[in-house]
Amino acid sequence: MSRIKWGNVFIALLVLLLGGVGLASVLGIVHLEGLPVSGTLSDLGLDIGHTHPTPTPRPRPTLLPTSTRIPAAQPGLAPAATPALVATAVPPPTATALPAPDPGFRSEVAVPESQGGNYPLGTITVAFDKEFPPYAPVVLLFQEKLAEKRGLGIRFVPFDIEDRNRISEERRAELLRTGGFDVLLTTMDSYSLWGGPDIGRVTGVIGESAGADKAIVQTPQIATFNDLAGKAFAYSDGSVSEYLLYYMLRVAGVPATNVIRLGHENLNQAVRRYTDREATGVIGWTSSDLDTAMKRPGSKVLMTSDQFRVTTDVIVTGTGALQNKRQAVQAFHDAWFDALKITIEQPERAASDMREWNASWTGVNSTQDLTDALGEFAQATLADNQVVMGDQVLPLMQARYKDAQAIWLSGGRKLRRLLRDDELRSVFEPIFALAADPRTATATPPVNPTFHLTAKAQVAGLTPEQQQRLVTVAQLGIKRLQFEPGATRINESGRRDIESFVIPVLRNTVGTYLKVEGSAAWPKDAQLTDNVVNAIAFERARAVQDYIVKFGIPVERIVLGTTLPQCRDCKDSAQVQRDDGVGLSLVTPE
C-alpha cells in the first residue's frame, strides 16, 4: 500500500476550493471582494491538524416587497452602513418590480372620485347609468366622504358620457365577473338576461320604477298593447327598455315575432329612430332623451311603470368583490344607506351634492329636479331592504327573477343562464343589507313611499260612473276562458290560464283593474231567455273573480260585467262555443 502524499492532497483541495469560489462568484452567490486576496492556508480556514466546527449556513436573502424603493444617496452624505447580507441580496436595477396595477376599470372620462390616499379597505369601483336620479345618491359616497370615513375609496364609471363609457350589458357582466366593476346599479330584469350567480349577486334593492319607465307611441295607430302587432318599436338592447316591450307583448298575448323590433346600443339611438319616424313607438326611462321623444307630434304615453311595477332596480355585487373584498362591500352598503338617508331627510343637501358632482351626469340641478324624479321612483330604505332580504319576502324576489327570465324567453332572447327553481336563491346575497349599520336607517318616508313589496296596498273600488268610462289597456294573453255548455264552474284548463296569465299581471300592477265579462251561448231550440242567459254569464264572471281573490288580489280591483251572445237561437256550433266563456281585459279609469 503506497503512502498518501499529503502535499498533493492539499494542493488538490486548494484548487477545488478556489474553483468553487470562482464559480460561486460568477453565479452571484459570493462576491470576491468579501474574501482576502492573499494570505496563508490558515487565513483560508485550512489549518491542517485542527478541527473546526461546521459553520452556520447563511440565511437566504429575503426578497424586498415590490412597493419598496431603495433611496438614492444624498449628495454630500456618506451612504448608510448596510449589512453585507442586504447588499448581496439587492437585485440589479432592471429587475426591480413595479407596484401591481389596480384591476378596477377606470372611467374614460375624468370624474370626481377618491384620489390617492391610503384606504384600509381598498377601493370599490361602482358603475351606473348617468342622468337617472334614483342612482345619484351613490355620488354622496364621495361628496360627503361617506365611503372614505369608513376606510374605503370610491371610483365611478357613469355610462354614456360624451360618447364614452359606452359599455354593452354583456360587457358589463364580464367586468363584474373579472373585477373590473365591483358594484353595478342596474335593474333585476336586465340582470336576469345577462347575469347569474357566477357573475354577481343581488345584494341590495334600490327601489321600484313608479313612473320612471314609459312607452311612448304614436296615435291613433296604437291605443292598446294589442295594437303593437305589426308595428315598429325602438328600444335599448338588453335593458329595461327591451324588457318592457316583451312584457307588454306577453300581457296582450302578441308574439314578439309579430313586431318589428329596432334594438340599439343605447336609448339615445332608439329615440332618434322614433323622432325620425322610423318607429311607431319607443320605450325608455326618464331622461332628456325620452323628453325629446315626447316632442314628436302625435305622441302619447301608452304605459308607465307607475301602473306596471315590473322593474326593480338593484345593487349587483360582482363575484370578484364577493370573494376578495367582503369588508369593503359591507362598507359600501353602509355608505349607500347613509347616502339614502341624507337624500330622504335632507333633499336640499343631497341635491346640492349631486349638482356639485356634475349636474349633467346626475340629472339633478336643483332640489325640485331631485324630488320630481323621485316622485316617479319608489325608493327602498334600509328597513325595506331588511324585509325584502328576509326569509318571508325573499321568495317573492326569486319569483320576480323567474318571471323576468320567462319574459325574455317570450321575446326570443337567449338567456346567459336559465336557472332552475332550486337555484334561484343563489342569485341573492342578503347578508350585507341584513348586517347594515342601523344608524343609517331613517324613519322619514321617501318622496314616493309606495315600494310595492313592503307598502300596504291602498285600493279604491271604482264608482258606477267610473265603470262606465273605462279605458282598455290590453286584452290579456288569455283573452277568454272557455266554459262547458251550461256550466258555471271553472275547469282545470281555465284555472291554469288564470294562474299563468292573470295573477302575475295583477300582482305587478298598481292602479289598473281587471274587467271580467261573462257570456253564455244561446243555441237553437234551447228555450232560453235574456234573463237566463245573463244569469249564467254573471255566475261565470263571479266564479272567475272568486278564484282570483284566493291569490290575494283585492276584490276592489275586479270589475264584473256580462254581455249577451252575438248569436241567438244560434245554429253555428263554432259560434256557440265561442259565446260560452269569460272575457278578460286590463282597464284603467278615464
Image (cartoon, rainbow, N blue to C red):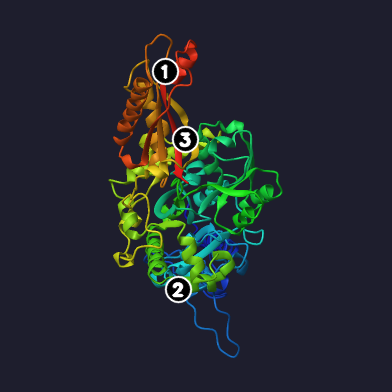
Q: How many marks?
A: 3
* Among the two numbered marks 1 and 2 on one chain, the one whose residue lies closer to the N terminus: 2
Instruction: Kindly identify which residue carries mark 3.
Output: 406
Which amino acid type corresponds to the residue marked 1 in the rendered image?
A: Ala
Q: Tell me if label 1 and label 2 are in contact, CB under 8 Å.
A: no
Question: Residue 588 placed where, x, y %?
Answer: 45, 44
Figure quadrant of residue 539:
top left
Please state which of the two labelled residues, at mark 1 or mark 3, is closer to the viewer. Answer: 1
Please state which of the two labelled residues, at mark 3 or mark 2, is closer to the viewer. Answer: 2
Instruction: Kindly identify which residue carries mark 2.
Output: 348
Q: Residue 446: which numbered mark, if any? A: none
Q: Secondary structure at mark 3?
A: helix
Instruction: Kindly identify which residue carries mark 1.
Output: 521
* Among the two numbered marks 3 and 2 on one chain, the one whose residue lies closer to the N terminus: 2
Which of 261 and 38 lies nearest the eye of the viewer?
Answer: 261
* Among the two numbered marks 1 and 3 on one chain, the one whose residue lies closer to the N terminus: 3
